[in-house]
Image (cartoon, grey):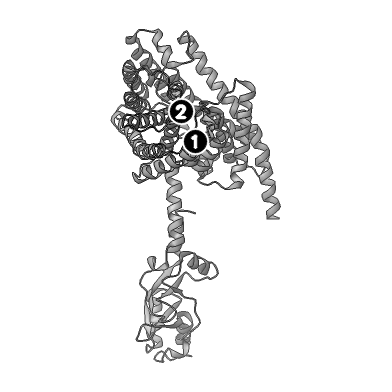
């Protein structure tokens, strides 16, 4: 019966994944059209924000970004006022992780409009944040109005979020892995299948309705595993592993600096002004960085050194995000990684090494830095692979991304997504539970020696409020237990002599645990026993009583991952 119910639930998820993917794709297309429409009003050609700003005098750039920041701030202020009356808006990742009932409509729309204002005015922030949040909202509405009793709304939100990210980057596998790694914290097949379907349908929908092309098609160059190339890959992994946490730390620094400015319009306006001033040094920092990545991969003329671009993009993104702008960090992270990978390749070329085309290492840097900031290495590898469609990159992507993730993890930085901190804490708690022994939870216990009288045993049992009193010999070997309530009743009704020895009343067969018993063994023992505490012995040979473990202590240990 349980198997049939499970199969029915799986079929429902598979069926609902198709409309979830289609709606998510339509949402991302609509958001893109909104950005294009606003930029079409502001610029003659708004398709490339880094070129569009050059239509205006240099001194006007900070004015545009400031106005955009102020508008975004006022919209965010209205969203925050609404949330103060109706409850804080949870991020879609928190909704999926905690299986909350749904995503609020008004807050999501207002925050998305705020993000739209920041993006359209050149803010250094990713478009995918608002797109995926809106896609998740569409999944929330779809789940709310569906009539499947076995369907959980958070599962539909997860499907729509995967479809939204896949539609943004034309990367269905990466979109599904993103939700599996970050939102679920697992990659179980049962949960991946509907995510794959939703993500694939979303990309197919985008292909049907728009001019489709891989975002950064780079299939012509081939990675050759020469010693120079391997050294470059290893260097990119190590450097991006350090750069990622520094990037996140710079955002946190700006956020703390601007925290005293309470009104979002003033805070975002100052952020926009600062980004406009940075853009006067190089307009390549404007926008999410999509066009600049294409230039780096294809060896285009940047008119700016890679090192300066790297530093300025970190600064501009830290200011935009740190000031409170609504948006994502995916594409800015990809640009910083591309610049970092290309810079490593260039430096090694100056040193006389020839690792190969610079674009290859820019693509490797994209994946490596994304893993260092998102803490989702599988998704990062597949996203770079799907966006470039270069099969020769798969091995170096895996190597550099794994190294970057390990190095970044050593800094114990929180990463882009706080939900991952909860997953990691649960994983660590579960690992600790699986590998821990009861000796770590053991506490002292009362005991009586074999030569004690019935009165002494009853007195000790009543004082400790225990049903059983543990009995040991003079070498502290556990002999068994004496039932306190039975002895007390016998003494009260006169059938037992309180000065008698306890030897005849010892129950020698009693459940025990040993100090090296695992938590799981203790859990299984408590599950099959009504007892609230069990004696812990040194080992089966000595049977020396060391202490006691309680069911409450074991439950407290398990609550962190249950």
Q: Nearer the viewer, mark 1 or mark 2?
A: 1
Residue 413's disc number: none
**Which residue is located at x 45 percent, y 18 percent?**
120
Report the residue marked by disc 2: 82
Per the model, the C-alpha gap separating discs 1 and 2 is 47 Å
User: Residue 164, how many percent across, how many down?
Assistant: 55, 30
Quarter where residue 245 is shown:
top left
Residue located at (69% from left, 54% from top): 3
Q: How many marks?
A: 2
Q: Which residue lies under the disc numbered 1?
A: 393
Along the line of sight, which residue is nearer the eye, 175 or 502?
Answer: 175
> From what the image shows, is residue 557 above or below residue 212?
below
Residue 69: x and y, percent? 38, 19
- First of labels 1, 2 by sequence position: 2
14 to the left or right of 369: right
Work out which quarter of the rendered image holds the N terminus and state it. bottom right
Confirm or deny contact between disc 1 and disc 2 (CB under 8 A).
no
Q: In the rendered image, is residue 416 in sight?
A: no
In the rendered image, which quarter is residue 450 located in? bottom left
Residue neighbourhood size for the residue with mark 1, other residues' Cα within 10 Å, grouped as few (<14), some (14–19), many (≥20): many
From this viewpoint, is residue 24 visible? yes
Q: Vertical placement of 286 versus 401: above or below?
A: above
């Amino acid at each position: 019966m349980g198997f049939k119910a499970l199969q029915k639930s799986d079929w429902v998820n598979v069926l609902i994944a198709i409309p979830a993917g289609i709606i998510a794709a339509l949402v991302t297309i609509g958001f893109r059209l909104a950005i294009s429409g606003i930029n079409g009003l502001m610029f003659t050609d708004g398709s490339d924000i880094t070129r569009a700003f050059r239509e205006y005098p240099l001194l006007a750039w900070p004015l545009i970004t400031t106005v955009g920041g102020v508008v975004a701030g006022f919209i965010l202020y209205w969203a925050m006022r609404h949330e103060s009356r109706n409850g804080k808006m949870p991020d879609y990742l928190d909704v999926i992780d905690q299986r909350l009932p749904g995503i609020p409509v008004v807050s999501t729309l207002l925050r998305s409009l705020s993000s739209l204002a920041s993006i359209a005015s050149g803010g250094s922030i990713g478009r995918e944040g608002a797109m995926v949040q809106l896609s998740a909202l569409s999944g929330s509405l779809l789940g709310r109005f569906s009539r499947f009793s076995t369907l959980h709304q958070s599962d539909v939100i997860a499907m729509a979020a995967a479809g939204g990210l896949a539609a943004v980057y034309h990367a269905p596998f990466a979109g599904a892995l993103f939700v599996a790694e970050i939102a679920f914290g697992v990659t179980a097949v049962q949960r991946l299948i509907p995510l794959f379907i939703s993500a694939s349908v979303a990309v197919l929908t985008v292909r049907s309705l728009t001019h489709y092309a891989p975002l950064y098609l780079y299939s012509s160059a081939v990675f050759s595993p020469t010693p120079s190339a391997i050294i470059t890959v290893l260097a990119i992994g190590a450097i991006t592993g350090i750069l990622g946490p520094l990037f996140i730390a710079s955002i946190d620094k700006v956020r703390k600096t601007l925290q005293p400015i309470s009104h979002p319009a003033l805070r975002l306006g100052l952020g926009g002004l600062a980004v406009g001033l940075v853009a006067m040094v190089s307009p390549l920092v404007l926008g999410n960085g999509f066009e600049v990545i294409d230039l780096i991969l294809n060896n285009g003329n940047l008119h700016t050194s890679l090192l300066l671009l790297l530093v300025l993009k970190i600064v501009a993104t830290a200011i935009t995000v740190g000031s409170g702008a609504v948006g994502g960090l995916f594409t800015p992270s990809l640009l910083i990684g591309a610049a970092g990978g290309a810079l490593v390749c260039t430096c090694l070329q100056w040193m006389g090494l020839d690792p190969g085309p610079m674009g290859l290492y820019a693509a490797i840097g994209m994946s490596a830095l994304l893993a260092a900031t998102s803490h989702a290495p599988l998704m990062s590898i597949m996203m770079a692979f799907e966006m470039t469609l270069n099969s020769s990159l798969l091995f170096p992507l895996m190597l550099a991304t794994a190294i970057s993730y390990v190095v970044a993890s050593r800094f114990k930085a929180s990463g882009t997504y706080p939900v991952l901190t909860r997953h990691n804490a649960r994983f660590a708690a579960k690992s600790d539970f699986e590998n821990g022994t009861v000796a770590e939870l053991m506490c002292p216990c009362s005991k009586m020696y074999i030569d004690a009288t019935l009165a002494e045993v009853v007195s000790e049992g009543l004082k400790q409020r225990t049903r059983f009193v543990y009995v040991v010999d003079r070498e502290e070997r556990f002999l068994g237990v004496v039932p306190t309530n039975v002895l007390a009743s016998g003494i009260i009704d006169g059938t037992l002599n309180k000065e008698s020895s306890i030897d005849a009343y010892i129950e020698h067969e009693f459940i025990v645990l040993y100090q090296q018993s695992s938590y799981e063994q203790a859990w299984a023992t408590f599950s099959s026993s009504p007892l609230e505490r069990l004696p812990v012995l040194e080992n089966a040979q000595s049977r020396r009583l060391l202490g006691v473990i309680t069911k409450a202590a074991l439950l407290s240990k398990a609550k962190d991952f249950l």
